[in-house]
Image: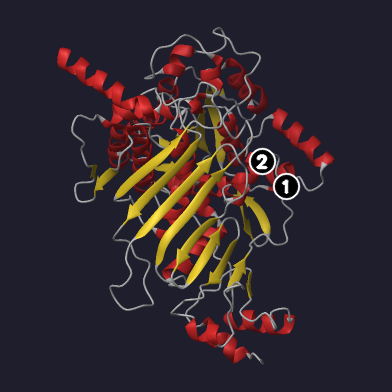
Amino acid sequence: MKWTRRDALKGLGGIPILGAVWWAGAANTVSKKRERSAILEQLNIQPSLPEAVPGISGDPVRVGIIGFGIRGQQLCRALGFATKKWKEDMKLAAEENPKHSALKDFMAQEKLNVKLTGVCDIFDYRANLALDSFNTDGNKIKRYRTHQEMIRSGEVDAVVIATPDHWHAPMAIDALENNIHVYIEKPMTHTVEETYRLRDAARKSKAVLQVGHQHRQTLSFQTAKDIIKKGTLGHVSLIQTNTNRNDDNGAWMYHIHEDASPQTIDWDMFLGSAPKVPFNKNHFFRWRKWWSYGSGLSGDLLSHDYDRLNCVLEMGIPDSVMTSGGIYTHNDGRNVPDVLQVNMEFPNYSTGSSQIEGKEKGMTFVYSATLGNGFNRPTILMGHDATMELGNRLTVWPDGRSTRYADMIEAEKMSPNVPIYQYNPGANSPDAVASATSQYFADKGLMWTYINGARVDSTFLHMREWLSAARNDGGKLSCGIDEGFEEAIASHMAGLSYKLGRRIEWDREQEILKPIEGIDFDQALLANTTAENIPKFLEMQQMDKIEG
């Protein structure tokens, strides 16, 4: 069958083709470079690049880093500050593997108009690591013992919060109330009540807040958003997204530093609002394994997947959430689950339909996680007309029973076995990652994106956007307080459903979780116990209230 350029353009009518895309609608012609080039030229295909932001001009933005652990050091590198140790390690890695380009990418990174003026970390080793690496004749930084001291010092315009989850909201609220700009890691809150207080503080403050969902800068997600808006998939009724890990680091079994002791760590400051327990290195370095300090799979990893789909679909907070799971792969004293299944329901959501009006409405978002198996399961968006596989790359497959593409499938100009198009913004860029966990983030589009074929740290782009808004009296943020509120509430609903073993519902009109008689949501969320013991815990809490 001869397939002409006219056929191709007719078949592509109404379908967004963006970025580095290859039309694959007819297997017997797709390999012909001339015809493919003609189609791309005719359509004037361009990547869906992140929006340009105003420059960060004037005096350098004075930034303080609160929490200089794993993520804190990564965020500092995005700002242009890498420790001496990291540079040495990356140099050795590049010598062993020429494709390992982390140091090269960092050195080529655009210089932001930033001055790192302070570090606040309660572990002496980490604070001293920052001081030793960043203190120069031209850039003197100071160690602050508390976030309050830093925020009120008059030496910072903005703070980066990369602490355990239970400190996120208190620090952010304090900064915003003092009109200090905030970049906060996810989840932005540890409790439901904090989520509302932080939103109020952000709305009242003259400062800006950005939540650290850097994937909103990734080209594939920008492109996917346009694809959805143009109805390429038809009505999307099911999303499946996953966490797949099978190594100790991925299960939050982080290294315990040999210098750790009650003399080098301010234990009381670490605990903060958490239950008072004796000094415990395991809790300090591996805090994500306990509800007292972290948010488990629901807040730590589901939050990524929810927000990266929310930035594409803009579906908002689910009407209801049901969660199940348990501790099945790492019985090591943790009380957060290591296997989790979350169903989020959006009964009134629609991406548009190619069928008769009223036939299609509603969507289920399924999140499935295990820390005991690393098999790569892609994120897929399943529509009536096509299915999208979404990560750092994206692929769209037509559905054999599609209404929109029925004529083309019948004429064998499309096949359910051949993608409508594939988009790989980094087709010519060599990628190398250091671990299975890094590969997990890379595959999801959470580590880097590509601009004109060059690999760029998506966290750098996200922080540049934040600093631009801070310096230029506001501006559009891709993940500000409203997006952060949706992510936090959705994550808390999943955590609560796991803890309580029942459906958690959202009242869209009143913007509250629908109350459950006798249940204090925050007490349930923070209870330092496994799900099966929650009913007994809540019963005891209720008795304490009555006796009190």
Q: Toward which corner of the image does residue 529 lie, by quadrant?
A: top left
Viewer-side label of 1, 2: 2
What's the amino acid at mark 2? Answer: Ala
The one of 450 and 495 positioned closer to us in this rendering: 495
Q: What residue did someone put label 2 on? A: 436
What's the amino acid at mark 1? Answer: Ala
Tell me the crowding category of disc 1: few under 14, some 14 to 19, or many 20 or more residues within 10 angstroms, Cα based.
Answer: some
Q: Exactly how many numbered labels are in the figure?
A: 2
Q: Please, is residue 77 above or below residue 407 in the view?
A: above
Mark 2: which secondary structure? helix
Residue at 51% of width from left, 19% of height from top?
283
Residue at 32% of width from left, 66% of height from top?
361
Residue at 45% of width from left, 25% of height from top?
335
Q: What residue did someone put label 1 on? A: 432
Q: Please, is residue 292 above or below residue 486 in the view?
A: above
Q: Toward which corner of the image does residue 41 lie, by quadrant?
A: bottom right
Residue at 61% of width from left, 49% of height from top?
376
